Image (cartoon, grey):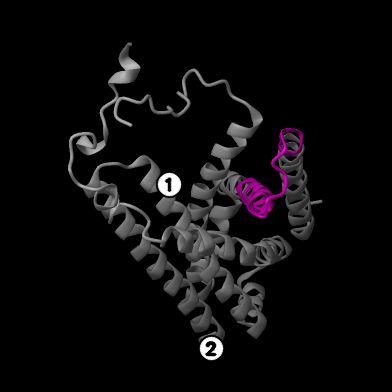
Amino acid sequence: MAGHPRPLSPHLQIYRRQLTSVLSILHRITGIGLAVGLLYLVCWLVAAARGADSFNALQSFNGSIIGRLLLFGWTIAFFYHLLNGIRHLAWDAGWGFELPTTYRTGWSVVVGTAVLTLVAWIVGYYQMGSF
Amino acid sequence: MDEVTKTPDLAGASRSYRSNIARVRGLGSAKEGVQHWWLQRLSALALIPLGIWLVASLVGTAGADHAAIAQWLGSPFTVGALSLTIIASFYHAVLGLQVVIEDYIHAKAAKFTLLILIYFAAFALGAAAILSLFYGAFAG
């Protein structure tokens, strides 16, 4: 046992990027982003409970460029984490470990995230009467 | 050979007279790792419908004024579903953040400070969200 070479983790600087590893770290990054988004959701709920003034102030920030960018980022993060989370649950159930399947589901997550994010924002703008 | 073989043995394992079980006792998951893993999956499963419902609702009420939002937030279904969403979200978030912290923060003081902070924050913020829901529903 002693002196036996132990397996090393891939060294990030020389490890070739591939879909699987990029999607894996994105799951973490979007998860952290969504935790921050949760904080913002609490602010929104507290503002709504405090009354129209607080609520309107927050809503006007939401309508600003920075507000919209944040909400757009959280929309992407939500749909990505949702779809890739379903992919993870499928793995937990023992399904989808073959390499071609992993790539197929991975690309489906990427395309699905883009489509759902766009649909959500088109419906949102339509709802606001901007179309 | 070269560098690779000079990897230090774990806690002087080759020289120690202690048995393997004595060395690892208290260092492992003590069977609690499964509980963390399972609750993360359970909250994930709950958040599939709850998360979709929340985002669909937020998109559906985009641009609505305070009166309309207060009315939506005040309905019994919204209070119930949103409470469940908040509980599941904070639970899921804190379990996930815990793993991230344990993976990347190795200084003991920083690690435990962060772990304590995120758990306290999750409970406090979750409580604030649910309280504001009930406050809005009954006082509004």
Q: Residue at x 79, y 55 (%)?
A: A126
Give the camera-side residue of A18 and B8. Answer: B8
Which structural element holds mark 2? helix
Q: Which mark is residue B138?
A: 2
- Chain under label 1? B
Mark 1 neighbour class, 10 Å CA radius: few under 14, some 14 to 19, many 20 or more: some
Q: Amino acid at mark 1?
A: Val
The reply, left or right, for residue A83 in relation to residue A38 is right
Q: Quadrant of the C terminus of chain B?
A: bottom right
Give the camera-side residue of A86 and A128. Answer: A86
In this rendering, is residue B56 above or below A112?
A: below
According to the picture, the residue beneath numbered tag 1 turns out to be B100
Quadrant hosting residue B85: bottom right
The reply, left or right, for residue B95 in relation to residue B82 is left
Q: Is residue B109 magenta?
A: no
Which structural element holds mark 1? helix
- Chain under label 2? B
Mark 2 neighbour class, 10 Å CA radius: few under 14, some 14 to 19, many 20 or more: few
Residue A118 in the image, given as x and y percentages of width and height: 75, 46
Magenta segment range? A76-102
Of mark 2 and mark 1, the one earlier in the sequence is 1
